Image (cartoon, rainbow, N blue to C red):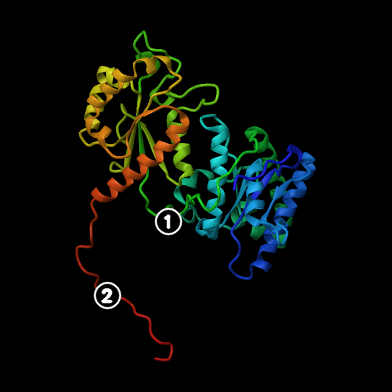
Amino acid sequence: MAGRIQAEERRPYFFLSYARSRYRPEDSDRWVAKFFNDLCHDIGQATGALNPGFMDRQIPVGSEWPDQLADALANCRVFVALFSPPYFTSEYCGKEWAAFLKRYHAHTAGLDRPPAIIPAWWTKMDISEIPEPLHTMQNVPPEFPSAYALEGLYGIMKLGRFREQYKETVLRLATVVKERAAECALPSGAVPSLSTVRSPFSDAAPGSKRPAVRLTLAAQAIDDLPPDRDTYYYGRTPREWTPFRGEGHTLPIGSFAEQVLSELGHQSIVETADEPPQEPADAPGVLVVDPWAARDRDLGKRLRQIDQDPVHVLAPFNSDDRQTTEAAADLGEDLTEALPNGSALKGSAMRVTSPAAFRDALPKAVNEALTRYLKTTNVHPPQTPPSMSRPTLRDPES
């Protein structure tokens, strides 16, 4: 399901992802259709686009529905997600999200671009109803009408006194779509089949206590590098370390890792090896280490301390970094000597040569870290049995 590439003028500005109503969807979804048409109208006015948006209700009866959906996901400029409680329990909405993100990251991996997913609040929601990894997306821009934040789109559509606020909200959303599409400049590209992708919300249900993933960065700052080490891949602090820096990759490795984990539905805690651990102290962890770090006296000592309670290790060996490539054998031995336990863990990757390889390696390391965490973390059962008996269902006639 790669999706056919469309001519530039035929590409939809946005793809509308929404959860179908379980109660009389043919009636309830007409409100979603009205919002979609209103948003298309305003985007059409603002951009002159021939095809402002895509919604699955546009697919003609008898058409190859998966192919049409793939075409839209492969060609849309941005992805508008209608947030509602059913959205995060819909497997299909999560798959649409995941398929679009894979295309987005394939074209922007490592580039500092704004997110191409725009949340729109369909119903009023408490933050506890939203998966934790998406909490950073929950803010409503201050220029939007206050009624939108209080009632959501459905509420201000249904309540007549908010009619003007609804019109203003749609107009402002159209402006956001237009501006974000220009900022992202996302070209058309292949998307995976929805049957092969996994919803990022499957293991991040609203209100769940899924453990966050700790990402520890072990690298030097520019001022701490030896005189003969190329400074191109480093920054003022270890957080600015960009081991895969190049024309097609400008994002520091910590930010890139956060992006990959967010795509998978994970919340992440990013820290550096020289910082005190952040809470929670027992989160499953992955160490992302510079191959040159073990040669630094203080950093090498810290790596050996970390390895006493080992975590999974990823070591970027950029194939375009001449110095690292020429010294790869010795650097690898230094790392293994400093991290003998972590490097031996299943899921660790001691020679990650490109951003694409890092994108593949990180989920494997995280999955193994989570498995190990769940096997070793302590579970505290209740100390005393409940004082009340469990309620039981009774026959209505009894």
The relative height of residue 25 versus residue 229 in the rendered view (above or below) is below
Residue 278, given in percent of the width and then of the height, sits at 33, 37
Residue that protrudes farthest toward the top in the picture: 227
Residue placed most toward the observer, 246 or 48: 246
Residue placed most toward the observer, 212 or 368: 368
CA–CA distance in space, label 2 to label 1: 26 Å
Which of the numbered marks, if any, corresponds to residue 171? none
Circle 2: is it few (<14), some (14-19), or many (20+) Cα within 10 Å? few
Residue 151, given in percent of the width and then of the height, sits at 61, 57
Residue 98, given in percent of the width and then of the height, sits at 53, 47
Q: Quadrant of residue 214?
A: top left
**Direction from residue 354 to residue 18 in the image, left or right:** right
Which of the numbered marks, if any, corresponds to residue 388? 2
Secondary element under disc 2, as helix, strand or loop, is loop
Q: State how many labels appear.
A: 2
Which residue in the structure is indicated by mark 1?
Answer: 207
